[in-house]
């Protein structure tokens, strides 16, 4: 039977991280991830240069908007510049954090690479990862029509500043793709571990290794996830304000803003959904470990809980099976996987529902405020 090549995309993500200085270390399959002084120096110089030219980039971006057809809209101009400034600040903070924690990041990458060698992504998770990568690529390509319309009549300093600004702005998107890929790798490993036919001791040992690696992953990424969630949510609310203002005043649909809000919402939801599924899979794995350790052979956990096994087996026989099946001392999974972010919130579906309800209330407030202003202006 012909087997298709399995290109999971994680190796491509790692190379892109190295290209953007999100992973300031060398990596090879034989040695793994190792920090190098020249790469560290190069990443530090790049970070200092980008930080020093960031005010100039924003100034040139402001001049670029003055030279285009959106100069009449003060609201759109301010929101666009605020979105750019927020993305640049988040990207510079991510680059600085990874440069500071480069040794811990290299150790984490070695653990993830070892996990990837033993358990590759399934086809389902591979397709999801590539869809996420293509969505980020589509976000970059959305800037092409703007450059085609206005690129010929803009001076080269503004075009250069716009290109550098796009580079810095999409560092956060590449970072989110890496976090999403790591979560999918954990999901694939947890699914494989739950299906694996092995003894209780080995099952608990592998579960403990997965949990330690996941906690290391969460500890290094929770600051970046906080910046991504808060920054993206504020950008969505700001662009929703611009969208509703334009819709009420002009009676039209701004495709650029609606497209941007849809892309950012999908990216944010993909991150929250992957974290939620990791927590659900780990809770199922814990239940599976308890079932293997404490449920007598030939019975299920539901049968033991409801007492349906009583007519089938005598009490002495069940007691004997339970004693032989249960190890001593009693052992069980001692930890739970939670994608907590700085102790403020946990990435799961309840948190996503909270964001969604807050956004809906914000839309209602915007509509009421805009309609009241329209009534006053007519009077």
Image (tube, helix red, strand yellow):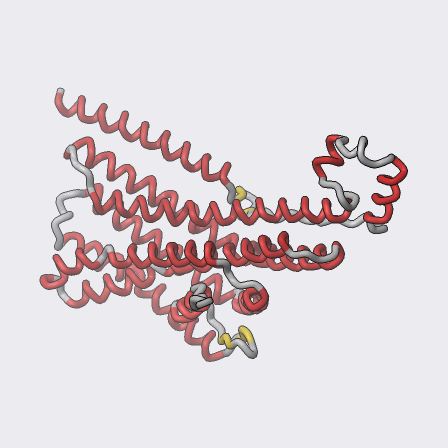
**Closest to the observer: 11 or 230?**
11
**Can residue 73 be seen from the camera position used here?**
yes
Specify the farthest residue to the front: 1
Q: Position of residue 232 (x, y in %)?
A: 38, 47
Q: Position of residue 308 (x, y in %)?
A: 75, 31
Specify the farthest residue to the right: 316
- Horizontal side of residue 217 vs 95, given as left or right: right
Report the number of discs: 0
Q: What residue do we see at 47% from left, 46% from top?
A: 272
Q: Position of residue 296 (x, y in %)?
A: 79, 44
Specify the farthest residue to the left: 153
**Closest to the observer: 20 or 301?**
301
Quadrant in which residue 314 is drawn: top right
- Horizontal side of residue 21 vs 84, given as left or right: right
Q: What residue do we see at 18% from left, 22% from top?
A: 375
Quadrant in which residue 31 is drawn: bottom right
Image quadrant occupied by the C terminus: top left
Quadrant in which residue 79 is drawn: top left
- Horizontal side of residue 71 vs 233, given as left or right: left
**Closest to the observer: 22 or 270?**
270
- Horizontal side of residue 191 vs 201, given as left or right: left
Q: Position of residue 47 (x, y in %)?
A: 39, 67
Query: Is residue 204 shown above or below 17?
Result: above
**Can residue 180 be seen from the camera position used here?**
no
**Closest to the observer: 264 or 67?**
264
Query: Is residue 16 shown above or below 79?
Result: below
């Amino acid at each position: 039977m012909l087997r298709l090549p399995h290109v999971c995309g994680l190796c491509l993500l790692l190379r892109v991280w190295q290209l953007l200085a999100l992973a300031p270390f060398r990596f090879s399959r034989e040695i793994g991830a190792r920090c190098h002084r020249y790469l560290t120096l190069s990443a530090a110089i790049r970070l200092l240069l980008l930080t020093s030219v960031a005010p100039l980039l924003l100034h040139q971006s402001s001049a670029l908007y003055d030279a285009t057809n959106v100069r009449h809209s003060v609201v759109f101009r301010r929101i666009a510049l605020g979105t750019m400034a927020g993305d640049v600040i988040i990207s510079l903070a991510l680059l600085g954090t990874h440069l500071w924690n480069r040794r811990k990041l290299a150790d984490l990458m070695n653990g993830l690479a070892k996990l990837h060698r033993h358990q590759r992504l399934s086809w389902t998770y591979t397709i999801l990862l590539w869809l996420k990568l293509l969505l980020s690529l589509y976000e970059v390509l959305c800037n092409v029509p703007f450059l085609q319309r206005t690129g010929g009549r803009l001076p080269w300093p503004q075009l250069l500043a716009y290109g550098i600004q796009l580079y810095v702005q999409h560092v956060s998107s590449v970072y989110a793709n890496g976090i999403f890929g790591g979560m999918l790798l954990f999901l694939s490993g947890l699914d494989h571990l739950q299906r694996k036919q092995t003894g209780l001791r080995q099952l608990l040992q592998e579960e403990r290794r997965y949990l330690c690696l996941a906690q290391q992953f969460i500890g290094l990424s929770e600051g970046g996830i906080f910046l991504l969630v808060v920054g993206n949510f504020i950008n969505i609310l700001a662009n929703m304000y611009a969208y509703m203002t334009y819709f009420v005043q002009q009676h039209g649909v701004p495709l650029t803003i609606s497209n941007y809000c849809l892309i950012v919402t999908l990216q944010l939801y993909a991150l929250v959904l992957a974290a939620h599924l990791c927590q659900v899979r780990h809770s199922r794995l814990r239940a599976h470990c308890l079932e293997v350790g404490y449920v007598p052979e030939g019975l299920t956990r539901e049968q033991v809980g409801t007492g349906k096994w009583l007519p089938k087996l005598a009490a002495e026989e069940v007691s004997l099976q339970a004693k032989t099946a249960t190890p001593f001392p009693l052992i069980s999974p001692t930890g739970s996987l939670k994608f907590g972010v700085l102790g403020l919130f946990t990435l799961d579906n309840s948190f996503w529902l909270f964001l969604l309800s807050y956004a809906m209330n914000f839309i209602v407030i915007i509509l009421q405020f805009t309609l009241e202003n329209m009534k006053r202006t007519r009077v």
